[in-house]
Image: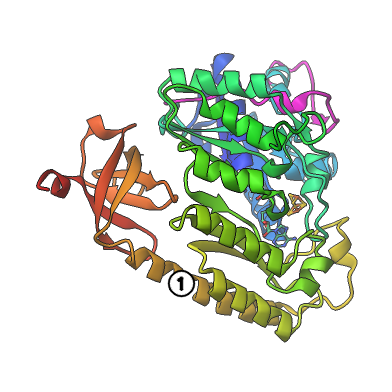
Amino acid sequence: MPSVFLKTYGCQMNERDSEAVAAQLVAKGYALAPSEAAADVVLLNTCSVRDNAEQKAVDKMTNLAGQFRKQRPGVLLGFLGCMAQSRGRELIDQLPDVDLVVGTQKFHRVADYVDDLLAGRRDKIVDTEEERGSEATIKEHLLNGASKGRAATAFVSIMQGCNQYCTFCIVPYTRGQERSRTIPDIVAECRELVARGVKEITLLGQIVTSYGRREILEHDGKSAFVQLIEAVHAIDGLERIRFTSPHPKGYGDDLVEAYGRLPKLVESAHLPVQSGSDRVLKLMHRGYTRARFLDIIAKLRAVHPEMGITTDIIVGFPGETEADFAETLSLAREVEFDNAFVFKYSPRRDTPAAAMPDQLPEDLIETRHAQLLALINEIAEAKHKACEGRVLQILVEGPSRKNPARLEGRTRANKIVIFEGSERHIGQVMDVRIVRAAPFTLYGDPAILNLN
Ligand code: SAH
Ligand code: F3S
């Protein structure tokens, strides 16, 4: 059977979509190629969120097309996902060697399209149509498959799209309107994963705190999202629940309270703040103030002082002044994030921010980016250092990515721990003592515990 190489750019949602596409291809008998060198089909699952993410995928495809045109002209080339959705046929006009362009609501059709193209039934295929019910079509998993092999953890897509329309963000255009799967459908998928050995599930969506808000009524003061977490929490054998990404405005008291009440819901939250300035937050259409954000953090820490809190921040939004940026720096100091992704603002087509006056020069954005990143790293390292000597619970995921002779797990607060262990630890929840903290990794020792 022909083999397929699938490369993924961007977020965890994209990783998850790629995994489902790969599983569908495998189910049809295709092999997964470890690299493009030997593959008969090369698919790039793309990201549009910043310009450089698009550029990477376009450059990669340009190189592949040039290389294959001479050596292996039969290789089939395709773009999937967000950039495919927003640029459609234009991608084939720009790169005529591309055979397939499939948008974000049609991942489940990829395997059939590849069949059609390889069999010569069709020449070029572009499908960026909307499809009713497409939020429930990303169900297949490749546990123990060639791509990840980390079967202790799994991602489950609970919804697609976003209606928040932050003024900088292309996601509502590439992923469409919010559409949620039903609770029974999601729980059935989670149950099956747990039956296959999965211990930790991450519920995924662009704005998970808006899950089901139009379809599922509040019950006992609990939002649809909290009802979903409760239903997943009830699955026997499941040890941990995470979710990403929430929106700060969705952190109602019901969700804060759930962290205290539901032991499988780990003490970890990725809460994208974007800016510390109320003026910028308003221009971004974020729907909360700095004070409200700080209030949520305080409430979460009141429930769990050990809560691991990470964030996303954009520097250089149009019109961001020195005073606005200073507010972001002071917010980072005040919250002491465990870590943060710091992004340079990138104007995206069709978004309101791209047309705002006072777009900042690149070098200024660069300077602010470096300054904020240095602060974030300093705080993150200090927080890591504070873990030395402590005993933390980890879920062992498998061999360490950096050093396969060792094992790697994550704490409940989502910090990576590397330790010397054996095969039998994989998939187990266990306690380790943290013996050393490097800037981005903790080193643990389970053996020391036995001496206690
Ligand atoms: N809620 C989504 C957001 C997707 S974008 C999720 O996390 O899945 C992820 C992050 O990229 C955002 O939180 C934001 O910080 C950043 N981002 C989005 N649009 C951007 C832009 N135009 N320029 C720079 N960064 C951007
Ligand atoms: Fe984008 Fe804002 Fe939604 S960042 S994904 S429009 S919450």
Query: Of 6 and 106, which appears nearest the observer?
Result: 106
Residue 214 % position (x, y): 82, 34
Task: Give the magenta-colored segment's residue range.
Answer: 118-144
> Residue at image x 72%, y 85%?
323
Confirm whether the magenta stretch covers residue 140: yes
Q: Is residue 384 above or below residue 40?
A: below
Q: Residue at x 25, y 47 (%)?
A: 432
Q: How is the image coloured?
A: rainbow
Is residue 217 visible to us here? yes
Residue that sits furthest to the front in the current view: 220
300 relative position to 162: left or right: left
> In the rendered view, would you say 369 is above or below 383?
below
Furthest toward the left, the residue is 451
Outermost residue toward the bottom in this view? 322
Quadrant position of residue 136: top right
Q: Residue at x 34, y 43 (%)?
A: 394
Q: Which quadrant is home to the N terminus?
A: top right
Q: Residue at the location (73% across, 37% down)?
A: 98
